[in-house]
Image (spheres, rainbow, N blue to C red):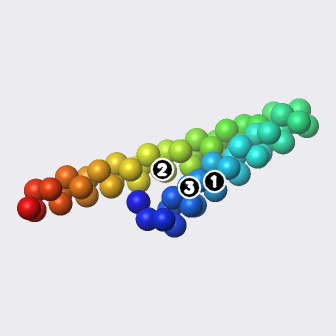
Amino acid sequence: MSTNDKIRNKAQELKGRAKENLGDATDDEELRAEGRADRSEGGLRQAGEKVKDAGKKVKDAFKK
């Protein structure tokens, strides 16, 4: 996973957490839902990148 992808995905998770907290503070269910969606999307992207990295490692192991 490239560093830029890690930063971008983590930023999306943090943005989602902030939206969710703001929604809690203002009792705005729509904002809470957006925050949960952003956090989930960032987490899923990180998981996808980790799978790609693992695939690369397996591929490299067979080259040796």
Q: Amino acid at mark 2?
A: Gln
Camera sees residue 34: no
Q: Residue 49: image x %, image y %?
A: 41, 54
Q: Is residue 3 above or below residue 28?
A: below
- Classed neighbour count for the residue bearing mark 3: other residues with Cα under 10 Å, few (<14), some (14–19), many (≥20): many
Q: Residues within 10 Å of mark 2 (few under 14, many from 20)?
A: many
Residue sitting at x 29%, y 50%:
54
What's the residue at 69%, 46% (across, down)? 16
User: Mark 1 packing: few (<14 Cα in 10 Å), some, or many (20+)?
Assistant: many
**In the image: residue 41, left or right of residue 62:** right
Q: Work out which quarter of the rendered image holds the C terminus and state it.
A: bottom left
As helix, strand or loop, the secondary structure at mark 1 comes to helix
Q: Position of residue 55 (x, y in %)?
A: 26, 52
Which mark is drawn over residue 46?
2
Instruction: State yes or no: discs 3 and 1 in contact (Cβ < 8 Å).
Output: yes
For the point 56% across and 55% down, the residue is 9
Identify the residue at the far right of this view.
Answer: 26
Task: Identify the mark at residue 50; answer none if there is no mark.
Answer: none
Q: Is residue 12 left or right of residue 32?
A: left
Residue that badge 3 annotates: 9
Residue 52: quadrant of the picture: bottom left
Give the spatial CA distance, label 3 vs label 2: 6 Å
**What x and y, as percent, mark residue 1?**
41, 60
Q: Amino acid at mark 1?
A: Gln
